[in-house]
Every structure is written in structure tokens, then in C-alpha cells.
Amino acid sequence: MRDFEYEAPTSLEDAVALLSENPVASRPLAGGTDLIDHIRTRRLEPDLVVDVKKIPELNVLEITDSGLRLGAAVPCYRIYGDSQIATSYAAVADSCRIIGGTQIQSRASVGGNLCNSGPAADSIPSLIALAARVVIAGPGGRREVAAEDFCTGPSRNVLESGELVVEIVFPARPQVGGSHYRRFIPRNEMDIAVVGVGVDVELDASAGTFVSARIALAAVAATPLFVEAAGAALVGQDVSDEAIAAAAAAAREAATPIDDMRGTIEFRKHLCGILTERVIREAVARARGEETGYRIGQ
Amino acid sequence: MAKQRIISTTINGNAVEFLATPRQTLLEVLRNSLDLIGTKEGCSNGNCGACTVLLGGRPVDSCLVLAVEVEGACLETIEGVASSDGLHVIQDAFLGQAALQCGICTPGFIMSSKALLDENASPSEEEIRFHLAGNLCRCTGYDKIVRAVQQAAEGETN
């Protein structure tokens, strides 16, 4: 691997200062599962790697009255290992359980998955569906962007020189709500999404009508895609096959995938519809507290 | 060149200090500096799991960890699995079930299996297969490995 310097600051201020000194040639390191491989293959050539795992703000993982705070460096296993998060913010836990294998989940973080900004990133549709906001710190201070506005292209995002993601914040959960993320891959695990779908729904007190819904897709556009129209197709509708089919049609319509070794445009658009229907049904079932028998790999 | 640093760790229960530059992976240091060559290099990009070690009790691909990151950490490698009394129950089960042929993947599988059984003493077959998805074996076809982990979970010895 090429030569670089390594620093492991214990405060956010120090991290921002280090990253700002030479923003072009420095990179933050969380779990390293993308970064170390990218340095080894020379896709990235940093002179300085700033390990952010010793910064308290980036390790926060807590549910408060105002919602969930997820520090950018928190590894996947801590997220799905927290039973309250796995229940209340289920889509994020679903994502974290299928990013890489067990070894990767010991290290990889949602913040890193977000900053890697892959169109097929498994955590990002869940962040978008759950209306997460990304808290960014940099030389100019702090700012927040909505999860759906973070990625700007393959491996590209809104981070500017010297900036890093501190945490991802999610609003408090509704009384009757459920979320889910699922992807299609030809294997059972350890693969990149051909299509991924994240859904969050809120139902009325009788759990019979959609109050709000947010739907996001992975691997069907240059960035993870928020499909506002798909959620809008559900709002105010009774939970029914027709309403769910209308949302799935909107998702299929919004997808602009490419042909590649993982799937054709036609196949990916078809999958968008099928998966969106299934993921909405799972999110509804979770909102209603019903057992659905969903297992990873289905 | 970035300077070497002194890194203090605990490896298999022993306090160990070593020198490393930031560009060296944990895998490189284990094998090339510490002579712990039981940990194998496979793909070097986090797909095959041959280099799995336990870092703070969690399985990690040591090819995707910088050696300088493990300052103050507790590591377990395949060299620490057997005791002076003999093989660990997992190693015994791998032998008994013929769960290896060429052996390159075996240390990684044993470390991943140990992490699983430390956390879940009686995993289902599905849980075993899912947990071991980050370890690749091109010889056995996996069934024998799964049976070995099941045997180890039942605490049977040969």
C-alpha cells in the first residue's frame, strides 16, 4: 500500500483542523472497509488518513424524545444489536444486517456507507425513507442536509473541503409506523444490490389508512433515489392492493437504471415494482405488529 | 516515509508491542513482523475472510484494518485457539467432520465460528450459514463446515 500519515484525533475540532490543512489529500477513516481497499488499489491516494473512531460525537447511538442519533462511525453490528433501534428504526437495522458479511459489519459504518456514496449503497434508502438528516462539520461550522440531498452522483456527495459527517439524526417514530429495507441479489448474502428498496409508512390509529409514506430506491439511478410520488400514492389511501400497486408503479416509473452485469434495465425496472410492493407490505405488517416471517435472503 | 510507531496490544492473552507504519495492515504485521503466520492472506480486499481475527471479541478481516488502529486493543488469532491441553472443540470438530481440504480458509473459518459460538451457543443451520457468509471455501462446498460448527455447538468431541 502507498505511504500515508495517520492521525487519530479525540475531538471533532482537531479532526476538522487536520482535514482542513490539506483537504485534497486527506481522508477520514471510520471502519476502513471501503477506504483501505481504495488506497490499496490506488483509487484514492491520500497523504493523511484521519481515524475518526475516537471522537465521542461520531460514536453516539441513542434514542431520545426527538428521535434517533446515529454517530457516523458507529459500526453496523452495534445498530442491529440494539433491540430498540432494530424495532423502531427497523429499515436501518435491515440494511446493516446485509452490508457485507459479519467481519465487515464489525467495522463498516452507516456514515462511511453514506460518504462512499455508491448508487447501490444499502443503508441510504433506509436513511431517506426514515427522513434522516445528515449533520456535517467543517471549517465553516455545522450544517445539515436531508439524506436524499447528500449524494450527487456515483461516489460524489455534498461534502466540501475539510468537512466530515458527524452524525445522522432521525425524527421520532409515529404511534403506528413501520419500516423495511430489502434488496434483490442473486445470492443469499455478500453481494451488491441489483435493486434495493427502503420504505417507511405511518398508519392511522386503526392501522387501516396510510397517513404518510416515504419510499427510496437503490441501484436504479446515479444516486440513491427518493421517489416522492410513490409515497404520495399511498397517503390518505386505505391499505389495499390497489394503493400498493399504484405506489409500486410510481417507483418503477421513477427508476432510470443502467444495463450491467448485475441486471438489465428491463429487469431492474421490473424488480423495482415487485420489491416496492413487498417492502410496503412488510412495513405495514411491522406497523401493525404482525409476524410476517421475513428472513434475510428472501 | 511516515515514521514507524510503537503499538501496544494484547494478542492471545499476551502483552505484545510492535513497530508499524500507517500503511501496514494488521494482516501484514501479524504475518511478517510477529511471525503469526496461521492467519492467512486470501483476497486482501475483505471478500474471502481467510485473514479473520478477533478484534475486541469481534471478527474482522485483518487485511482491512490498519496495524496502527489496534493500539490498546485485544486480539485473538488462530494461534491462541488451542490450549496446552489440546485442540479447541471447534478445531476438533473441523477435523472430525473433514471440514477442510487445502486449509487456507480454515483459520478464518475457525475464528469466525468461535465468534459465533461465543455469542450464540446453539445457532441454527441458517444462522451458521449467514454468520459464515464472509468466509469463502473453494474445497469443501460448506456442508462439512456447517456440520463441524453444529458439532462444536453441541460440545461433542471425537
Image (cartoon, coloured by chain):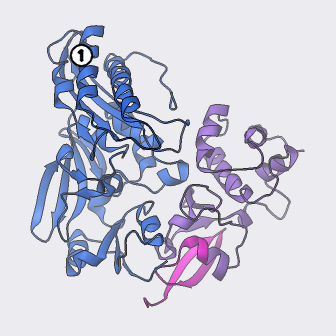
Chain colours: A blue, B purple
Which amino acid type is shown beneath numbered disc 1?
A: Ala
**Subunit ID for the residue under disc 1:** A
Residue at 78% in and 60% down: B82
Q: Residue furthest left?
A: A140
Q: Badge 1: how crowded within 10 Å, few (<14), some, or many (20+)?
A: some
- Residue B32 in picture, x, y percent from top left: 65, 80
Answer with left or right where residue B27 lies relative to residue A95. right
Residue at 46% in and 57% down: A107
Is residue B18 one of those drawn in magenta? yes
Q: Nearer the viewer, residue B129 or A265?
A: A265
Quarter of the figure that contains the C terminus of chain B: top right
Extent of the magenta region: B1-28
Is residue B45 one of those drawn in magenta? no
Q: Quadrant of residue A236?
A: top left
Residue at the disc numbered 1: A246
Q: Nearer the viewer, residue A64 or B21?
A: B21
Image label count: 1
- Residue A279 in picture, x, y percent from top left: 36, 24
Quarter of the figure that contains the N terminus of chain B: bottom left
Q: Is residue A155 above or below residue A40?
A: above
Q: Is residue A193 above or below residue A55?
A: above
Element at label 1: helix
